[in-house]
Amino acid sequence: MLLIFDCDGVLVDSEPLSCRIDAEVLTECGVPYTAEEVARDFTGVSIKDQITRIEMERGIRLPDDFTERLNRTLFQRFETDLKPIDGVRDAILSLPFPRCVASSSIPERIALSLRVTGLADLFDNIFSSTQVARGKPAPDLFLHAASRMNTLPEECLVIEDSIAGVQAARAASMRVIGFVGGSHCGPGHAEKLRQAGAPVIIERMSDLPAAVSTSC
């Protein structure tokens, strides 16, 4: 069995920080957003798809350097403020299965996130939505990861914190565990993941080994 980990909100506790910065940069660009609105609308969604949705729904065009400005600010803050999800390293090391990361973030952000949180040595295989035509909730990224890891979709287990990610895993015909232990997960998030298709929900990474065993 192949374990496929999302990054933001599963391996690293980045969502509140990234949503806050995303909202700040959008507002600076003349498109007012709150961190709560960014979290509600774009958690688990690639930056490319976020820009497309904003421009379509707001009838505007974001500055050409929006992505560069956002990433520059994010990377600076990640270097000093980003933390791993509590207990994630021990949980991963206790699982005797091949593993990889499949994230909506760009490769540079994934690499930075894993490096500053001390998790980089745990993953030799990292996949980004920039490598596929469609991001989550489409299944493309997870199917790409499975193909590159020479594993059938039905032999994969995805660990996800977002509705889009759970939907992507289900669309790929993969099993999925919903994780609601990130600091961005408020009341009701577990039920949202369950409705999206995650039959098993955990709140702590210490519960991951048992959840994986149940899902096998």
Image (cartoon, helix red, strand yellow):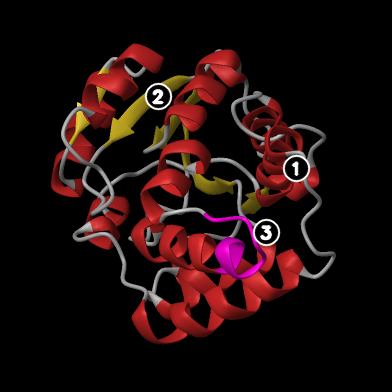
| Three-letter amino acid code at the position of disc 3 | Ile
Q: Quadrant of residue 71?
A: bottom right
The residue carrying mark 3 is 106
Cα–Cα gap, marks 3 and 1: 20 Å
| Three-letter amino acid code at the position of disc 1 | Glu
- Rendered view: 195 above or below 156: above
- Rendered view: 86 above or below 213: below
Which is nearer the eye, 146 or 62?
62
Q: Residue at x 67, y 42 (%)?
A: 54
Q: Residue at x 48, y 69 (%)?
A: 113
Residue 45 x/y as whole percent: 58, 41
> Secondary structure under badge 1?
helix
Give the numbered dot on residue 84: none
Which is nearer the eye, 35 or 175?
35
Boundaries of the magenta span: 25-32
Answer whether residue 134 is visible to the viewer in this image: yes
- Rendered view: 154 above or below 185: above
The quadrant in which the C terminus is found is top left
Whether residue 82 is in magenta: the answer is no
Residue 156 x/y as whole percent: 50, 26
**Is label 2 or label 3 in front?**
3
The residue carrying mark 1 is 55
Give the mark nearer the N terminus: 2 vs 3: 3
